[in-house]
Amino acid sequence: MRSYQLEVWWDGQAIPEVTSVSPLGSTTDVITYRDGAGGVYKLPGRTDTVPVTLHRGVSADLAFDVWATGPGLKKEVQLRFTDASDGLVVTYVLHGCWVCDYDVAADPETGAVVESLTLSVNRWERIRPPVDELAKRWAVERGAEVRHVNLADLLTGRLEETEKRLEHLLAEVESADSILLFDEADALFTRRTDVQDSHDRYLVTELDVVADRLARSDRPVFVLPQPDPPTDG
């Protein structure tokens, strides 16, 4: 199991000396329905997010106190967990946070003074890294290499030739124990449902073959999205 160091961020700044954070969680009500025939059905109801509490020793930094005693402002809070052994960073974002409880407690035996900030959280999510970075992480963890492939170069316009190229590629990847990363392939796969002319129909057939064959492959496959077009201004 990995060991992580915790960093807490809000307002674009790291909050120093936060020692622990309570578990992130959410609960969903279970709604039970009964029909006239005696059948019982359970459906998800309202989902509520569990409050999150941050703990740290009292210091010269006033970040906890300022948020707790100031205007009832909502903030986005980031929890960054870093594994120092390889630099892996896992980030969770807590949206719509506001202070619902703030405590300062002294331990007369040790002399320690701890402040605790409890946040009501609208929702939280884990930030997913870019696809290429995720592929590199998988490769490093498995001692493998990332094989970049341009999907457009794989398509030949002839179904049998495309199948041969794909099988040759998969054999090479299997032999080298590599991870496949298709560059900007999402735009082409999208065209499977957007047929314009007879040429497109044949391209769709090729893409179907490629997608179905990759789905049956035991190798990890990543698809790098096409970059967003530049915007004026």
Image (cartoon, rainbow, N blue to C red):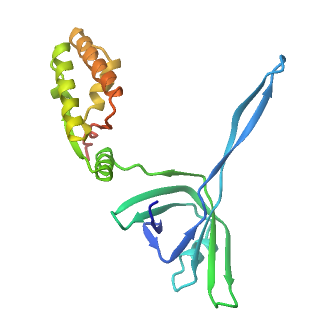
Name the image quarter holding residue 39.
top right
Q: Position of residue 109 (x, y in %)?
A: 69, 91
Q: Residue furthest top?
A: 198
Residue 111 shown left or right of residue 19 in the figure: right
Please name the residue shown 42% across and 66% down the image.
Answer: 12
Residue 64, percent across and down? 57, 75
Q: Nearer the viewer, residue 34 or 96?
A: 34
Left of 171 or right of it: where is 191? right
In this picture, residue 169 sits left or right of residue 32: left
Position above or below: 68 against 185: below
The residue lying furthest to the front in this view is 175
Above or below, comparing residue 119 to residue 164 in the picture: below
Q: Position of residue 202 (x, y in %)?
A: 23, 12
**86 or 204: which is nearer to us?**
86
Residue in the picture at 15% in, 17% down: 161
- What residue lies at 23% left-to-right and 44% top-to-bottom? 146
The mark tally for this picture is 0
Q: At 49% from the left edge and 62% from the top edge, which residue is drawn? A: 79
Closest to the observer, 77 or 215: 215
Q: Is residue 91 above or below residue 48?
A: below
Is residue 201 positioned above or below 187 on the image?
A: above
How far across and how far down the image is residue 137, in percent? 32, 51
